[in-house]
Amino acid sequence: MELVQPILIATSGDHVVTVSCAARASVLAYVQPIMAGEPVAPEWETWLGVGKSAMPTTVRAAGQGDLEAAGRWAEEKQVNHLLIKDGTNAALALAPVQSSGIPAVVDQVSEADDDLARSDQPAPVSTATVRVEVAASLTTSRAAAQAARALWAWAVPQLIDAPEPLAEWARTGGVIDLAVVDALDTRDGAFIVRDQDEPTAVAIPGRLLKSV
């Protein structure tokens, strides 16, 4: 059976900010507790072991009520999860589960591939620890899934190679610079994720941004 990570995004949000919230919640739901020495679900290790080419997620758009209900369920069941809010934007990520056993509180939410409103995005933050770019052609739900994959592709090596900087990044909220672009920056050193051989998102370490 395939493991998937459920992610809920609020339908009230903006495309760019919501995608950023979803990617951060996806990664920080694991990185924050593991770096703090807290227990995590065993499914994480199996899910992470599939590598950056997979790490499947199921992203669903939800009303605030459904999103909050899922958060309460996770609290009651002591399931690793993280809710990130930014104004009317919000995303909730849970620990991976079997695709056939998605919790009812999530499964009842529509799988509609919603495309949220797109406003002018903020200027890039070149001092960010990592920059994530997603293809402009993707809907919000799809962009959230691909941005999460890209951020994971960057974060997993840091767990071994640079745990202290990763822990500090997680402690300070896991801020990223996210941009929606027509042409992805696939420079050497970028972590690239693809769908049917087409690049859909990239994560660019901050050290590369600062060297330009």
Image (spheres, rainbow, N blue to C red):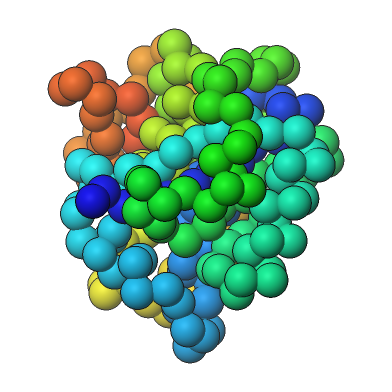
Q: Quadrant of residue 173?
A: bottom right
Residue 38: horizontal and vertical position, in percent? 51, 85
Report the residue that reaches farthest toward the bottom.
37
Q: Is 118 above or below relative to 87?
A: above
* Direction from residue 203 to residue 138 in the image, left or right: right
* Camera-side residue of 62 and 151: 62
Report the residue that reaches farthest toward the left.
197
Q: Disc count in the image?
A: 0
* Direction from residue 110 to residue 203 in the image, left or right: left
Q: Quadrant of residue 109?
A: top right
Where, quadrant-wise, is the C terminus in this rendering?
A: top left
Residue at position x 36%, y 46% in the image: 99
* Direction from residue 50 to residue 201 in the image, left or right: right
Residue at position x 40%, y 42% in the image: 57
Residue at position x 47%, y 69% in the image: 31
Instruction: Report whether residue 208 is seen.
Output: no
Residue at position x 53%, y 27% in the image: 111
Residue 113: horizontal and vertical position, in percent? 53, 20
Instruction: Report whether residue 78 is seen.
Output: yes
* Direction from residue 193 to residue 196 in the image, left or right: left
Residue 78: horizontal and vertical position, in percent? 60, 74
* Camera-side residue of 5 and 13: 5
